[in-house]
Image (cartoon, rainbow, N blue to C red):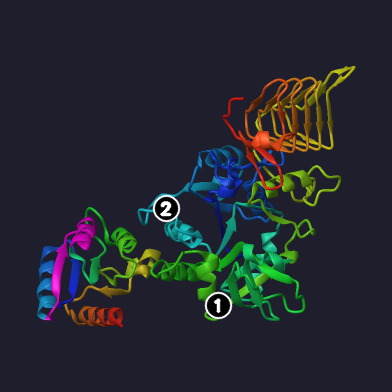
Amino acid sequence: MKKVLAMVLAGGRGERLYPLTRDRAKPAVPFGGIYRIIDFTLSNCINSDIRRVYALTQYKSISLHRHIQIGWNILSGPLGEFIEAIPAQQRIDEHWYQGTADAIFQNIYTLQQEKPDLVLILSGDHIYKMDYRKMIAFHIEKAADLTVAAIRMDRKLSREFGVTEIDNDWRIIGFQEKPEVPKVIPGDSEGILASMGIYIFNMELLVRRLIEDARSDSTHDFGKDIIPMMIGKDQVFAFDFRHGDVGRMGYWRDVGTLDAYFETNMDLVSVTPQLNLYDSQWPIFTYQPPYPPAKTVLIEEGRVGTALNSIVSNGCIISGGSVKGSILSPRVMVHSYAEVEDSVLLEGVDVGRYAKIRRTIIDKDVQIPQGMKIGYDLDEDAKRFTVTGSGIVVVPKWIKL
Amino acid sequence: MKKKILIVEDEEGLRLLYKEELETEGYEVLTARNGKEAIKILEEGKPDLVILDIVMPVMNGMEALGRILGKDKKIPIILNSSYPGYRQDFMSWAADAYVMKSADLEELKNKVKELLKKGKA
């Protein structure tokens, strides 16, 4: 068995998710009621039997560190297993990480200590279910130096992705970062093979290429610099995500924008979500404080506590209000006569009596006063809150209403 | 113009020997006694190449290597040690050459010449 070390890049600022990322890094953004975005990648590691995992953090990392320390302290230290967050330490040089490759280079001493055979580089920003063992087996079978996981995307989306060009053997023969005119998949003129930001490297070669990159004029990015440098020189292959896709739905999301965040959450309250959270063979782990079960109360004329087509997390009380098509994180209170529809309410939100909330994301612990309406008059909402292109209102943390 | 070489070496005798020998070769020579001094002199003296001992007090060569590259990622660096073991240290791979200390300075001088030539091209 090859010794594998996973390094999860968890330093992303997630600027397009602002204000949800005002106080936390993107991987720490709550998702699907009880999860944080990084839980999906970490669960993939555990379910793939990868038990040596570092998460490399950088900006606004306190809540991410706390989540990993409290929620992911589930492995056995004496057996050499760990999931640990490493903050940017400026150990090699006195600057923040300059790119994805620099983040690994700055942690070269960690590689030195662990001495894995293979390094699995992951992003803490994506939501998907993948068996990394399939990719590792492919990497070994091809005797690859670098394997890049790739997923078919519509060619119209090429400007959002690194696009791989492959030959019949899935060897990568070209790589363009966010091209306007992409190389399409052979035999599929509407499709491109997009890099998922998931890489397996032979450790020693990784170190050598990172050093070369560190000493050259470069943006120190895997997609822009390292992969192009290695093509034609080293054994570089693409791994077809379909062969490792646990859900078999081709589900992989970069919840990079507020609209994408909203839609990805909303998918979960559909009858058969694309992302199946109920697969006992592939559990998604997270940290949950010991809150009591969710409950609904009151059945009176015009004052019925209900939740329909919704996810309701522990600690929630829906007391005489109505919730439809929404996601309620733990400890949400919905008071009498209030209406919550097609919304995402993060932990501890309190919706006062007669308040009406529609197509709105409300960040942690916000108190919605009695009778307030949000999501009904977007011009009015835009004066106080973020309103996205598709009309989703985002109410930030700490706001006094 | 004379090429400038920074010698980072804690042992005084060796430092003087290197300085003399390299000056005879026609280089201008700066010296530092440890990694920390080296970084200061790097900024003030703007050398064209660094010869870096590894085992030194205050700041060792391996740490200094990272710091020097952080300030000037292109400057040629020769690690110069009595111990071959530091080749196992990944950071040592970031140096342009690893030359073992020896009474005969021929190898070191040749490396200096070679790397300075490469830098010019």
| A343 horizontally vs A180: left or right | right
Of A392 and A167, the residue lying toward us: A392
Q: CA distance from mark 2 to mark 1?
A: 28 Å
B105 and A333: which one is in front? A333
Q: Position of residue A136 (x, y in %)?
A: 64, 66
Give the secondary structure at mark 1: loop
Q: Residues within 10 Å of mark 2 (few under 14, many from 20)?
A: some
Residue sitting nearer the eye, A356 or B95 = A356
Q: Amino acid at mark 1?
A: Ile
At 90% from the left edge and 17% from the top edge, which residue is drawn? A301
Up-down: is A35 above or below A166? above
Counting from the top left corner in percent of width and height, residue A69 is at: 55, 40
- In percent of width and height, residue A82 lies at 56, 48
Q: Which residue is mark 1?
A: A231
> Is the same chain shared between marks 2 and 1?
yes
Q: Which three-letter amino acid code belongs to the residue tagged 2?
A: Trp
Which span of residues is magenta-colored?
A: B25-44
User: What kind of element bears circle 2?
Assistant: loop
Q: Earlier in the sequence, mark 2 or mark 1?
A: 2
Q: Are marks 2 and 1 in contact (CB under 8 Å)?
A: no
Image mark 2: chain: A
Residue B94: name its quadrant. bottom left
Q: Which mark is residue A96?
A: 2
Q: Count the marks: how many?
A: 2
Chain letter for the residue marked with disc 1 in the picture: A
On the question of residue A42 being in view, the answer is: yes
Residue ID at (13%, 67%):
B15
| Residue B5 is a magenta residue | no
Res. A322 mark: none
Q: Quadrant where the C terminus of chain A lies? A: top right
Query: Could you tell me which residue is drawn at 44 percent across and 58 percent down?
Result: A98
Would you call the spot at circle 1 few (<14 residues within 10 Å), some (14-19), or many (20 or more)?
A: some
